[in-house]
Image (tube, rainbow, N blue to C red):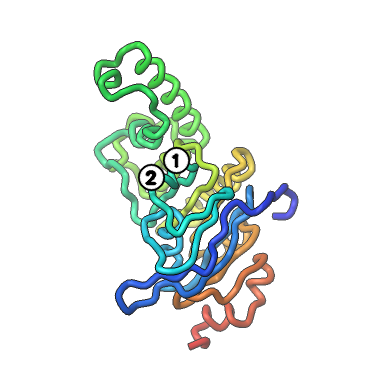
Amino acid sequence: MTDKRIGDVTLSLESISLSFGGVKALTDISFDVREHEIRAIIGPNGAGKSSMLNVINGVYAPQRGRIVFRGQTFERMNPNKAARMGVARTFQNLALFKGMSVLDNIMAGRSLKMRTGILAQMLYLGPAEREELAHREFVERIIDFLEIQGHRKTPVGRLPYGLQKRVDLGRALAMEPSLLLLDEPMAGMNVEEKQDMSRFILDINDEFGTTIVLIEHDMSVVMDVSDRVVVLDYGRKIGDGTPEEVRNNPDVIGAYLGVAH
């Protein structure tokens, strides 16, 4: 993963600490994400990986630390502000509209891009009609990119799990994010589905130039697609570096073999 141009730091997490009651989910964690890279967050179950994504896009407010995103500093991020600044997110547990079609689910990701008023949209007046056609054209390109053309009118609930995960990814892409947060995008997939999803992630990063932060348990996938990896264990950072550096880190080896505690 060294043949592409990785830019300056676009996101910096500085001394992030997060607690729920007396339970420490994250303790003094710092790391950065560079423009155009794929940055993986790994660790055993309960390590704090999803909590960190929730801090980045504003679902959780850390008790300590700060977030610097695209030159702006935040004590906490707001989910709506994060979306407007170009942060999109997929979720470990799918939150799709199961009775709606693939096309309509992905169209939901265009809501922040809508400029005409609600009344004009309801009445489908001229500007609203033109805007919706433009958004549908954009969504159709995403559908083609994700190779789900034959399912565009199918209710999402009828699709196999692996295709539902693609729809979830498509809805995030519809926001045209500069930073894409992927929370276990390959959980529950078979080998072929994982290979397809890995290819899409690499293509999104390469063709769209999208910066990606990825949580994933499959270490072979992480080592194949990531530029850098940060490792969490029990809410603390125990490793950070290239896939090769992390693979050879004694603390990481200990955590994954269960001998660190």
The residue that mark 1 highlights is 84
Q: Quadrant of residue 225?
A: bottom right
Q: Residue furthest top?
A: 126
Picture disc at residue 80: 2
The secondary structure type at the circle numbered 2 is helix
Residue 42 locus on image (x, y percent): 52, 67
Residue drawn 29% across the image and 16% down it: 124
Residue drawn 44% across the image and 47% down it: 82
Q: Nearer the viewer, residue 142 or 7?
A: 7
Disc 2 crowd rating (10 Å Cα; few below 14, some 14-19, many 20+) is few
Q: Nearer the viewer, residue 143 or 72?
A: 72
Q: Quadrant of residue 241?
A: bottom right
Q: Nearer the viewer, residue 95 or 145?
A: 95
Q: Quadrant of residue 169?
A: top left
Residue 163 locus on image (x, y percent): 40, 44
Residue 123 locus on image (x, y percent): 25, 16
Q: Relative to 73, say whether 80 is above or below.
A: above
Residue 256 at least partly seen: yes
Q: Relative to 252, say whether 54 is above or below.
A: above
Residue 185 locus on image (x, y percent): 45, 54
The secondary structure type at the circle numbered 1 is helix
Amino acid identity at mark 2: Asn
Residue 186 at least partly seen: no
Q: Quadrant of the N terminus?
A: bottom right
Amino acid identity at mark 1: Arg
Residue drawn 42% across the image and 31% down it: 113
- How far apart marks 1 and 2 lie (CA) works out to 6 Å
* Discs 1, 2 touching: Cβ within 8 Å: yes
